[in-house]
Image (tube, rainbow, N blue to C red):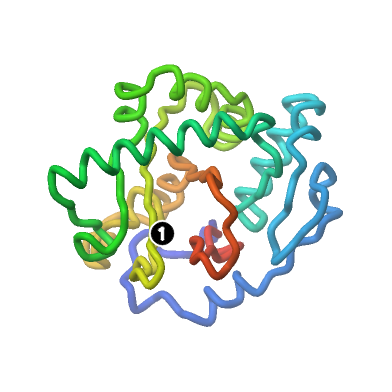
Amino acid sequence: MNPLLPAFVNADAVRLEDFARLCDQQTRAEDYPLCAEVRSNVPIYNAQTLRDTERRMVMNELHRLFRDGPGVVVVRQAYTDLAVVDRHSEVFEAIFAEEAAAGAGADHFAKAGTNGRIWNSLQKAALLAPASFAEYYANPLLGLIAEAWLGPDFQVTAQVNVVPPGGQAQQPHRDYHLGFQTAEVVARYPLPLHALSQYLTLQGAVAHTDMPLESGPTMLLPFSQQ
């Protein structure tokens, strides 16, 4: 962080052109020797490469990528047995049916009933189908990637969001602790705390189905975390 920056700033100190300059950076495959390729500025890794490479080497590369690089990765074939993912999809469908019978809840980024949302799906899945929960979260790559950013002893939370055809997209947002506050509240926190906050969170997703662009997957801005 620039030592000449003031500790406290207001929203009017943020310039869109500075943000655009960050997002205009280009990812170079040679900077991430373990990745298989780079597509749309995102390094893509083969899961087997991560399994076969010395753990500390993998974590060093991933941490550097999250901190100084595009901030997002894709891991192909992270689950070698897709039946594990399919069984957990069935658990989600059962939870959806159960909660639909109890009435739809609001999404903090969309109107109630717009999207299919399971809050705290980790606990709900564990209670409903403990065997599926155990085999799904036992994937060591989940822990490897999380530890690369957060270190050991991290905690896991999980949510499910399904946007149906024609559904409303979520509002643009940043998923970190201070990212859910108003600009007025955020301005009360010094800039070092903004940087610290992002080191406390890592968000990941498992693709349970094919996700072409037409299906409306989450859009990300590589390098925007910087």
The x, y position of residue 192, in whole percent, is 42, 51
Q: Quadrant of residue 101?
A: top left
Q: Quadrant of the N terminus?
A: bottom right
In-image side of 177 versus 61 (left or right): left
Residue 30, compared with residue 111, is above or below; it is above
- Decide which of 43, 94 is in the foreground and name it: 94
Q: Quadrant of the C terminus?
A: bottom right
The x, y position of residue 163, in whole percent, is 38, 61
Residue 140, compared with residue 117, is above or below; it is above
Q: Name the residue carrying label 1.
A: 174
The x, y position of residue 132, in whole percent, is 46, 23
Residue shown at the point (73%, 40%) measured from the top left: 61
Q: Quadrant of residue 222?
A: bottom right
- View extreme (left): residue: 102
Which amino acid lies under the numbered mark 1 shown in the image of this protein?
Answer: Arg
Q: SS of the residue at dot 1?
A: loop
In-image side of 186 versus 17 (left or right): left
